[in-house]
Amino acid sequence: MDEFQEILQDFLVEAFELIEQLDQDLVELENRPNDLELLNRIFRVAHTVKGSSSFLNFDVLTELTHHMEDVLNKARKDELKMTPEVMDVVLPSIDMMKGILKQIKNTGTDQDGIKIHDIVQKLDLISKGEDLSAGNKTAPSTKNSQKTPDAKSSGSEKTPVGGEKKESKEYVNDLADEPERDYSSMSESEVEAEIERLIQKKAQADRNRRQQKAQVSESGIEKGQSADDVDINVSADEKDSDIPVQHTKPAIQKAVATTEEKSKAIEKSDKAGDDPQKAGSNVEQTIRVDVKRLDHLMNLIGELVLGKNRLMKINDDVEERYEGEEFLEELNQVVSMISLVTTDLQIAVMKTRMLPIGKVFNKFPRMIRDLSRELNKKIELEIEGEETELDKSIVEEIGDPLVHIVRNSCDHGIETPEIRTQKGKVEGGKITLKAYNEGNHIVVQITDDGKGLNTAFLKQKSVEKGVISQKEADNMSDKEAYALIFKPGFSTAAKVTNVSGRGVGMDVVKTNIEKLNGIIDIESEVDVYTTIKLKIPLTLAIIQALLVGVQEEYYAIPLASVLETVRITQDEIYTVENRQVLRLRDEVLSLVYLADIFDVKRVFEGYDHTYVVVLGLAESKIGVIVDSLVGQEEIVIKNLGEYLKGMDGIAGATIRGDGGVTLIVDVAAIMHMAKGIKSQPMTTSETKGSKTKSSPSDYTVMIVDDSKTDRKIMRSALNPLNVNIIEASDGVDALTKLKSGEFDVDGMLVDIEMPRMDGYTLATEIRKYNKYKSLPLIAVTSRNSKSDRMRGVEAGMNEYITKPYSAEYIANVVKRNIGLE
Amino acid sequence: MSNKLQEVVRKQTKQQLKPTETDDVLQLVSFVVGEEEYAIPILTIQEIIKPIEHTRVPRTPAHVLGVFNLRGSVIPLIDLRIKFGVPMTNKSEDMRYIVLKDGNDTAGFVIDRLNQAMRIRKKNIDPAPEATSGNKSLIDGVGKQDDKIITILRVSKLLERDF
């Protein structure tokens, strides 16, 4: 049974790959109905699927493909002309085939659901009906010379595996003379033996062929000898077969026969002379890998990146501490080498997960063809940059949005030929799909030369539908008005059609692009064009992030969503209708405090200056106010686990260089959340004012010293002040006490030399907290060299008292520093 | 020679058979939250660590302290004292995080003090008192040992999101 599953999997993978190319070929075929090459390719798909499905006992699929094969075979032999009417039957039958394959993928059977009866009948009619008129066998003699360029223009050349594919086709041919056996009645071992035999046979034939080929390429123009090879070359290229044992019946031989009759041998043999060489240079070594393995590899790289970040942090610390030491140089070299290699490794693994966007673009020619027939419009599709690569997961996500945008462009953008001529445009509309790289992003651009977006009309429609108020509409910029098309429930279509007009499509676009942390940008000119630009980050797992500080917490914002950061003063913030806004150049940007979104307690007073991070996502923008900008860092996204999954506003977490966890902001979510938050402006010193200090006993001073005697001396010196005194025995102890929040400390006396954590480190640690930025720290030490004092100042000490000191002096210094009069 | 060998084999099989006895003994680890002693099956414990720094996660209930970094994994931290409504005692040296695992769910729990590892015979474990029984309850059962009883917690329930 397992073996069967394996074969089934292979079959499905292969079938879907074949089908992908098929759509494009079929559309191409309509333009060049006589292109034998295309016909052969299409025929082979139907044939392969039929063969495999009969082997796997998928009767429904077999029956359908069998009838398709009949029609296509007739066409191939020129007994049938591929008129649009015929295509209208063939295309749906291909769709149905896809449907059945999907069903097999999901349920493992083709028995229920999809009814093929009607289509089979139609196919039958075609193949029979046209039978009578068949007989017109005058194939254009130019056919052969067209073949190669044609195949290329249809887009198939982007997979440079021609040589390989050709060979794989030959395998099939080697076994073509095998009689069809009833494999279902064989036992497992028998089947295995049979497979073994076939493989050997194929290998043998393969060897022969290679020898033959070598001879051919040498002798070159000799027609008779090369004929066999040539036919295979001509007819075979789209077959990417992983299953050596194919049930390819003599059909291929038929194909060979027909081409032989018609083709001009000299042209062929010329080609044969070239082909082996091409095959030799083009063979690309590929290997199919389970995506799970790549994901695992990516995870491991993620861990490595975290380790690298940590190492770099440690390196910085060490550098600071042991400045000028020789071993630092060496350490530096190692660290930067590891950092470089890690980055390279990450890029390399990322690349293995990359797929050309052509995989998505491929389905559009067919779609445009169907739509233009349905809508009675003439639409031409131009595709550029289909070789642009991006992460597999993104390729999967981007398909739907593109479909919606393209459908929209066809339905709403491109006008009917009549209107276009009235407007003085060419009759046929054009849609351009373009992909290119831009920094760490990939840009997918969809342009149509249709009627463009009319802002006045958009506004009027949205007011009518209640999406926005009249007042909002009046204040809207053009860009904002364009963005209206993404609002759920918005549609400019007068009536709901099959194609669009329900007002959901563009909403889907927005949601999906948001999911990818992408940005949507629209440009348009009435009656000239509409361009929708999707800017999407290259990968999702490891990202660049901007670290921001809010009070004492840090958050990471994906850099892909950050448009810019600005430093502003409090009075640049205006309040309009209970919302805070900022005038940024010629735009009005609504603001939100990150602290409000994440319920961060406002412990310290606001500074004069604050930072605004301007975030852009999909089509909207928002300014997020933070207290500080920490810097840019490469982060690895980790999820928060089952327990905390799907928390509002949090996309995940990452581990920082120091081992701490930093949460990653979900930009899309906070944009939604921002709408519901009514923030009050940050009042200065709201907390400090709440508790007035009237008597000396309201003040608290902490003494940090490891020597009990010293603590006692200081305590007795401060006793006359009548302030509260708490003691800590070292830096760690002091920091814990301070952080516990039990004591409202107004000043600290800090010894420098202490176990566990010394005075300098303690001061540095304390100053990391915004809350204690201005807490008076007084160093009490016997170290009195200038460099010691300098270090004290650098660490954030306010005063420096050297031992020995008089009780009076220390009391005065404390008094002055904590502001006790 | 073969006799000896057989004897060895017999001995080994005997030893292997022994553990079947332990099947009706449950191995537990007990700990203290507030005044009360609780226990959890030893196999659900991934590890027990000393308190380390954690990061607050906004918009969560009070008993969810946040997340912490356990050798590269981000793990939620839940304070059982707040969850059980026990008054907060000051931080003590004995405080620990117990990291529990049930399937794919992992979380760390703050407890006041670790007590001991123990074996309780299954027959000495009573189901939870009726008022609190059912799968929804946090209490899996009540174990009797010598002169005291001990509450056995249901780990799957502890790890279930409760907000």
Image (cartoon, coloured by chain):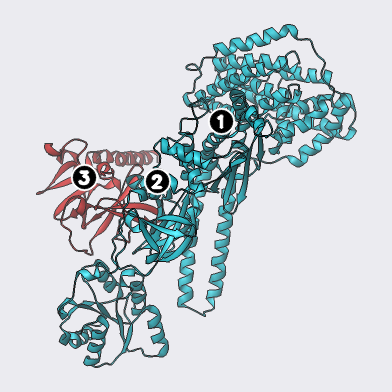
Chain colours: A cyan, B red
Q: Which residue is mark 2?
A: A471
Question: Disc 3 designates what residue?
Answer: B153
Q: Nearer the observer, disc 2 or disc 1?
A: 2
Q: What kind of element bears circle 2? A: helix
Tag 2–tag 3 contact (CB < 8 Å) = no
| Residue mark closest to the camera, 2 vs 3 | 2
Residue drawn at (33%, 86%) of the image = A800
**Distance (Cα) linking label 2 and label 1:** 30 Å
- Residue drawn 59% across the image and 36% down it: A451
Question: Marks 2 and 3: same chain?
Answer: no
Q: Identify the secondary structure beneath mark 3.
A: strand
Tell me which amino acid carries mark 3. Leu
From what the image shows, is residue B41 above or below residue A778?
Answer: above
- Residue in front for this viewpoint, A96 or A112: A96
For the residue marked with disc 2, what is the amino acid? Lys
Instruction: Name the spot of residue A587 as percent of width and height, x first.
Output: 47, 56
Residue A573 in view of the camera: yes
The residue beneath circle 1 is A411
**Residue at the location (73% across, 6% down)?**
A132
- Residue A31 — which label? none
Q: Position of residue A112 (x, y in %)?
A: 47, 16
